[in-house]
Image: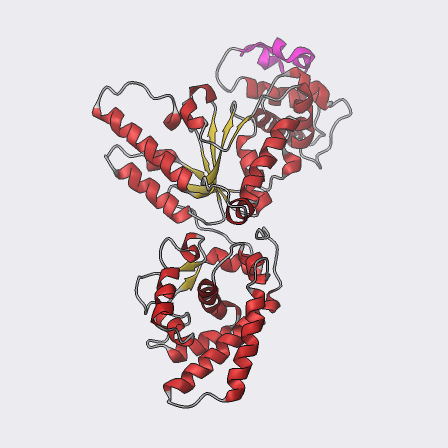
Amino acid sequence: MNAPLGLPADLSALQPEWERLQVLAYCLSLSRQGREIPDDEIARLRGLQLEVDALRTPGGTWECLVGQALDPVEWDVLAAVVGPELEPRLGWLYQSLQNPPQVFPSRALIHELLALDALQGHALRAALGPLAALRRHRLVQSPADDGWHALLPEPGLLARLTGRQWDAPAPPGAERVLSRATWDDLVLPADRIAMLREFMLWIEHRTTVEDNWGGQSVGGPVALFGGPSGTGKTMAASVLANALGWPLFRIDLGRLVSKYVGETEENLNRLFDAAHGRPMVLQFDEADALFAKRGEIKEARDRYANMEVSHLLTRIESHRGPCILTTNLRRQMDAAFTRRLQMVVEFPRPDSTARAALWERLLPPRAPRAEALSVTRLADAAALSGGQIRNAALHAAYLAAGADSAIDLPHAALGIWRELTKDGHECSPATLGDLAAHLPEACGHA
C-alpha cells in the first residue's frame, strides 16, 4: 500500500508501541539494579507485543503511515526513534537510561532494551547501514557508525506522520519555487494533461510496482518538458509538486558547474545527497545546455565536459525522487539521453482557443472590465505565449488602476504591444489587427 500524500494521520493507533517501549524501559531499569521483573509486567509485555505485531502487518497502520514494508528489527528501530517525538515521556526515560543523557536512543540502548543476543545485534547493526531501508528511504538518521550516538528521525518523516507541512531546506545550488498552481490552472491540450497525470502515477505508485509487484527500479522518475519560453513548463512542474504536497526546487546549473576539474561532480553530489529520498521535486532548467548532442572531442576540456554530463545523468537516474528537466530547444537534445527518460512532454504555443482561456484566467478576477473587452478578441489579436499573456494582462490592469477605470481595450492593446516590442524587434501596429486603433499615437513606430 502506498503512503497517503499530505493527509493528516490518526496516530492514536500507535499507542501500544509507546506503552511497549515504556514497559521495556522499566524492565531494563530493574535489570540494571539486579532486580527480578514481576510476572505481571512480563504478561503485560506479551499482550502489548501482540498488539504491536498487528500494527506492523503488511498493509497495516505502520506501513500506511510510512509507505514502506520493513522487517521486525527495522520496525523496532523506527518505533524507538520516532517515539520521543510522539510520546515525550519516552524521551525522559531514554535520558535516564543513557550516559550522557540523550532524548533519542542510541543503537546500544535499543540493543539493551530489546535484550538482543549477538546474532540479533548483528541484524540491528545491519538495519542501520547506509544502504538499508531505514536510511535509504530517509526514515532514520545515523550521525555516526557506532553504538553510542543518538539515532534521529528524519524531519520529513515526522511531518508526514503528524500531518504537518514540512518546509524542506533548499538543497545546495537550488532555490524554492513558490506557486499555488493546480490542475485547473493548466491550459494545455488534453493529451498533454494526460501525460502529466501519467507521470504522477510513476511517483504515487512506486511502492506498489517496485516493492509489491517486483518491478524494476529505474530511479527518478525523470521527465523532460520541452517547448518555447512561456508555455507553462514551470507551472506544470509546480502543479505536480503541489498535487504531491511537496516543495519544488529549481536547480541553477550555473552555480554547480565549475571550470575546475572534479568540482562540478562534487557540487552535484552535495545536491543529490541532500535531496535523495526526500519529499521534493527537482527542476533543472535549460537542460539542452548540458544534454545537447555531443560532438567530437577536440581538447581535454571537452572530455571533462562529457564526464560531467555522464556523472549528472548517473546521479539523476539513481536519485529516488522526481526530476523535471526543461528545455526550449528539444531538437538539440541527445536522442540517446531522451530515450532514458520516463516521460517527454512537449508544451506547444497556445492556439486561439487556449489564448482566450488564458486571458480569462490571467486578467485579475476581481478587476472591473469594460463591456467591450472580449477575451476572444484579445486572443485573436496576437499569438502570445502564456507567459506573455500574463504580463500583458497585468500591464493592462495597472494601466486601468492608474486611470481609476475598468480594464478596457486601450489598456489591453497597450499591454499586448509592450510584450510584442520587448525584444527590440521592429513591429507594426497592424500586427494587432483591429486592436491597433486603440493604441496611443506614440506607438505608430516601434
Question: Which residue lies most toward the left here?
Answer: 300
Number of numbered discs visible in the structure rendering: 0
Q: Name the residue rendered at 38%, 44% in the picture.
A: 272
> In front here: 190 or 375?
190
Residue 24, position as x, y percentages in the image: 46, 78
Q: Name the residue rendered at 25%, 37% in the picture.
A: 262
Q: Is residue 433 magenta?
A: yes
Residue 26, position as x, y percentages in the image: 46, 83
Q: Quadrant of residue 101?
A: bottom left
Asked if residue 214 is positioned above or below residue 360 in the image, the reply reads below
Numbered range of the magenta stretch: 427-446
Q: Name the residue rendered at 46%, 69% in the picture.
A: 80
Q: Quadrant of residue 191?
A: top right
Asked if residue 74 is positioned above or below residue 108 in the image, the reply reads above
Left or right of 225? Residue 28 is: left
Question: Which residue lies most toward the right here?
Answer: 371
Q: Is residue 207 magenta?
A: no
Residue 204, position as x, y percentages in the image: 57, 45
Residue 2, position as x, y percentages in the image: 57, 51
Left or right of 439? Residue 333 is: left
Q: Is residue 172 visible?
A: no
